[in-house]
Image (cartoon, rainbow, N blue to C red):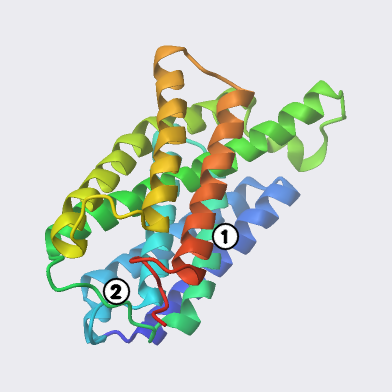
């Protein structure tokens, strides 16, 4: 049995090496170090997948720990980076995903024993539909955030006619960043919608009402409405460039607020810490 501590340590090491190698490759404009960073991130992902498949979390009584939730989020983030690397032939999404996965793992270490109790009525289908779809959509949104933020920054430099030298010359083109933003939006929105609907369906038998006014429900619906606007304008109006980039950045910031502030510091059914 792979212990949570061992799994976390090895994956942290691989994601850490991937992050350093990728950043060095970007700054030094070295294709070798960038590719090495991508392969190291892939190795970390494979090791983490094996540890998840062997069920290290099953040794924890009462459900998954808060640390395990953060590690699952890291797994989805790196998965999206790998898919973007393979599909779009761009190293940048995975190079961005590796440090984010590293940060999530670093945050998870102190909380491996902080078990989040799950009501017994929420069985495997709930995790597949609600937790799984939301985690995958948030991971895609993280890439949309990175692509959107970089698009805004690079566009501002270009419009102000600042000289693009050094590693800035190796940044993805604005059209590619917009393509990444569009791809992640189109894939993530249906997943987020499915996650929200499944959560509302299961809320009735668990909490007694479909909508209870819980802070997590309120902010999730607000995020979904903004996400709907981004998705619909992308599809029906052909939104491109700065507007969808800014909205994607704002939506992801709201998601972080929901996870960090609402789940940790507010009275909610989804609280990480039960008082």
Residue at the (42%, 34%) spot, across then down: 225
Residue 80 visible (yes or no)? no
Residue at the (43%, 69%) spot, across then down: 267
Element type where label 2 sits in the image: helix
Residue at the (25%, 53%) spot, across then down: 130
Q: Which residue is mark 1?
A: 99
Residue at the (50%, 32%) spot, across then down: 181
Q: Residues within 10 Å of mark 1 (few under 14, many from 20)?
A: many
Q: Which residue is mark 2?
A: 51
Compared with residue 162, is residue 129 higher up or lower down, i.e. above or below? below
Q: Residues within 10 Å of mark 2 (few under 14, many from 20)?
A: many
Element type where label 1 sits in the image: helix
In the foreground, 34 or 3: 3
In the foreground, 199 or 126: 199
Pointer 2 with pointer 1, Cβ within 8 A: no
Residue 62 visible (yes or no)? yes
In which quadrant of the rendered view does residue 163 lie?
Answer: top right
Instruction: Identify the residue at the far top of this view.
Output: 237
In which quadrant of the rendered view does residue 37 lie?
Answer: bottom right
Residue 94's spot in the image, x, y percent?
Answer: 50, 49
């Amino acid at each position: 049995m792979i212990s949570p501590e061992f799994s976390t340590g090895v994956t942290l090491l691989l994601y850490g090496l991937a992050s350093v190698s990728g950043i060095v490759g970007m700054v030094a404009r070295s294709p070798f170090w960038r590719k090495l960073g991508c392969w190291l991130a892939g190795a970390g992902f494979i090791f983490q997948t094996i540890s998840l498949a062997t069920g290290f979390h099953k040794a924890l009584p009462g459900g998954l720990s808060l640390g395990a939730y953060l590690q699952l989020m890291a797994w989805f983030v790196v998965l999206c980076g790998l898919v973007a690397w393979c599909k779009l032939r761009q190293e940048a999404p995975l190079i961005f995903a590796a440090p984010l996965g590293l940060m999530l793992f670093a945050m998870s270490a102190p909380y491996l024993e902080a078990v989040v109790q799950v009501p017994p009525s929420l069985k495997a289908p709930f995790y597949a539909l609600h937790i799984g779809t939301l985690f995958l959509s948030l991971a895609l949104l993280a890439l949309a955030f990175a692509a959107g933020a970089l698009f805004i920054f690079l566009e501002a430099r270009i419009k102000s006619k600042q000289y693009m030298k050094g590693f800035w010359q190796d940044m993805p083109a604005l059209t590619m960043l917009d393509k990444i933003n569009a791809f992640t939006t189109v894939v993530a929105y249906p997943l987020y919608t499915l996650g929200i609907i499944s959560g509302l369906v299961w809320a009735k038998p668990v909490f007694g009402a479909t909508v209870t006014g819980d802070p997590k429900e309120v902010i999730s619906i607000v995020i979904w409405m903004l996400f709907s606007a981004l998705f619909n304008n992308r599809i029906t109006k052909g939104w491109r460039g700065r507007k969808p980039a800014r909205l994607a950045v704002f939506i992801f910031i709201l998601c972080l607020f929901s996870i960090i502030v609402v789940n940790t510091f507010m009275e909610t059914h989804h609280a990480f810490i039960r008082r």
